[in-house]
């Protein structure tokens, strides 16, 4: 149980000692699910924010605690809240502007059963046509209505996330104000480590690669006489942890695919390759291991996964275009000149604010740019 959840339980249940708090928590699948889903305030790149799932629950709790708190008999006769009412509400919450409806429709129930309460047939969210309600069995523990406790946990989680986001924005703004390019490189390099949060690692790695590749020239044309000089351009395909089909960055004009990932789950590498029909992918990996060590480990995994069958091994080996680790990113960062470092920092600032749906203003420019996704 996370400390902030224990604190809320202690305040809401003042007569309970620590042992009673632990017992109460253990009896509540809903509280255990919220404990599972609120790890992003402490987590690294392995931890997703899960706002869609958390907000799907909170949107129902928000209206329930006003309408049905400690009214079990009335709630048993309730048909549920209208989908539009819930969807409009959770899209109004912090970071909820771009959330889709998957959590309300199925995602929460599937994960809840898989990870928390597989022994019962009851869904956490009851869906009846276009109406939604939380199952009453999960709203009471030993006769205590826990809706206000659950809502407080979610509200505290969002407050903590907001503070964390604002701290990161402040850090980026301080970086922009540094006068020495070498100092900027040192600070950026320090942010590239194995404990970096997912969105920070992806945004910084993208910004480094974008500014590193943009000075590389290639020649394209339909004949030798028509060759044209072009510089490499890298594009980000969407938000961190978005359903991007296995592609985080795309490079023009070469058509290269890049996927940011962890070193710990090689099965995901193969899944990403499958998503793009075995088109070659460059993996940008949050690890300080050497690229040779990663390639060797990945090859061993493919050997085991394929059962030694050549046709399967080649399918995946040939789809790994390049491995890029923290080591390569730091090396390429060190090669950038002063002007490019400033552009890189603007990219970090731009894309982080875009992640948070905040307006972006170019430093030193009279024109401001609001970016929507």
Image (cartoon, grey):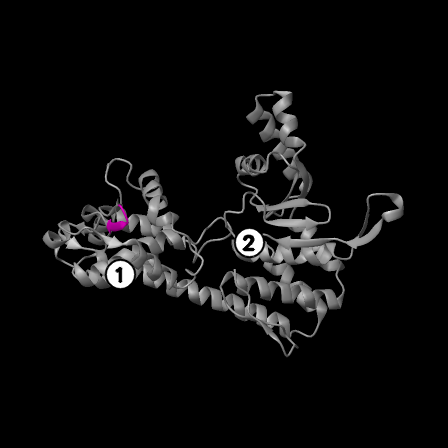
Few, some or many C-alpha atoms within 10 Å of disc 1 (few <14, some 14-19, many ≥20)? some
**Label 1, label 2: how far apart the Cα atoms are:** 30 Å
The magenta region covers 129-133
- Which residue: 19% across, 52% down? 20
- Which residue: 11% across, 54% down? 74
Is 47 drawn above or below residue 372 in the view shown?
Answer: above
User: In the rendering, at what x and y percent does residue 258 appear?
Assistant: 63, 46
Q: Is residue 35 left or right of residue 220?
A: left
260 or 40, nearer to the observer: 260
Most frequent secondary structure within the magenta stretch: strand
User: Does residue 349 appear anywhere in the picture?
Assistant: yes
Q: Is residue 163 left or right of residue 219?
A: left
User: Mark 2 = which residue?
Assistant: 238
Whichever of labels 1 and 2 marks the residue nearer the N terminus, that label is 1
Decide: marks 1, 2 in contact (CB < 8 A)? no
**Secondary-structure class at tag 2:** loop
Few, some or many C-alpha atoms within 10 Å of disc 2 (few <14, some 14-19, many ≥20)? some
User: In the rendering, at what x and y percent does residue 194 appear?
Assistant: 56, 51
Q: Residue 81, located in which quarter of the rendered image? A: bottom left
User: Mark 1 = which residue?
Assistant: 62
Count the marks.
Answer: 2
């Amino acid at each position: 149980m996370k400390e902030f959840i224990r604190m809320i339980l202690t305040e809401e249940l003042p007569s309970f000692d620590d042992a009673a708090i632990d017992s109460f928590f253990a009896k509540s699948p809903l509280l255990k699910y919220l404990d599972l889903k609120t790890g992003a305030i402490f987590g690294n790149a392995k931890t997703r924010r899960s706002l869609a799932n958390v907000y799907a629950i909170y949107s129902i709790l928000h209206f329930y605690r006003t309408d049905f708190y400690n009214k079990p008999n009335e709630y048993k006769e309730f048909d549920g809240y209208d989908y539009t009412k819930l969807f409009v509400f959770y899209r109004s919450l912090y970071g909820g502007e771009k959330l889709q409806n998957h959590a309300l429709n199925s995602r929460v129930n599937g994960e809840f059963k898989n990870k928390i309460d597989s022994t019962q047939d009851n869904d956490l969210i009851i869906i009846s046509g276009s109406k939604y309600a939380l199952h009453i069995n999960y709203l009471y523990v030993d006769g205590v209505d826990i809706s206000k406790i659950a809502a407080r946990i979610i509200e505290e989680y969002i407050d903590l996330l907001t503070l964390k986001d604002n701290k990161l924005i402040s850090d980026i703004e301080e970086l922009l104000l540094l006068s020495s390019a070498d100092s900027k490189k040192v600070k950026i390099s320090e942010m590239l480590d194995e404990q970096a949060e997912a969105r920070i690692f992806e945004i910084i790695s993208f910004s480094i690669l974008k500014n590193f590749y943009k000075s590389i020239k290639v020649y394209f044309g339909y004949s030798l006489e028509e060759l044209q000089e072009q510089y490499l351009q890298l594009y980000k395909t969407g938000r961190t942890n978005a359903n991007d089909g296995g592609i985080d960055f795309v490079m023009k004009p070469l058509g290269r695919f890049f996927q940011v990932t962890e070193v710990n789950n090689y099965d995901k590498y193969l899944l990403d390759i499958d998503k793009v029909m075995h088109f070659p992918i460059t993996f940008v990996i949050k690890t300080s291991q050497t690229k040779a060590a990663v390639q060797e480990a990945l090859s061993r995994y493919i050997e085991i996964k394929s059962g030694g069958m050549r046709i399967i091994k080649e399918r995946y080996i040939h789809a790994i275009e390049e491995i890029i680790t923290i080591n390569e990113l730091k090396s390429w960062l060190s090669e950038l000149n002063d002007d490019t470092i400033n552009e890189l920092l603007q990219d970090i600032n731009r894309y982080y604010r875009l992640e948070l749906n905040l307006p972006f203003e170019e430093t030193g420019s009279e024109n401001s740019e609001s970016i929507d996704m």
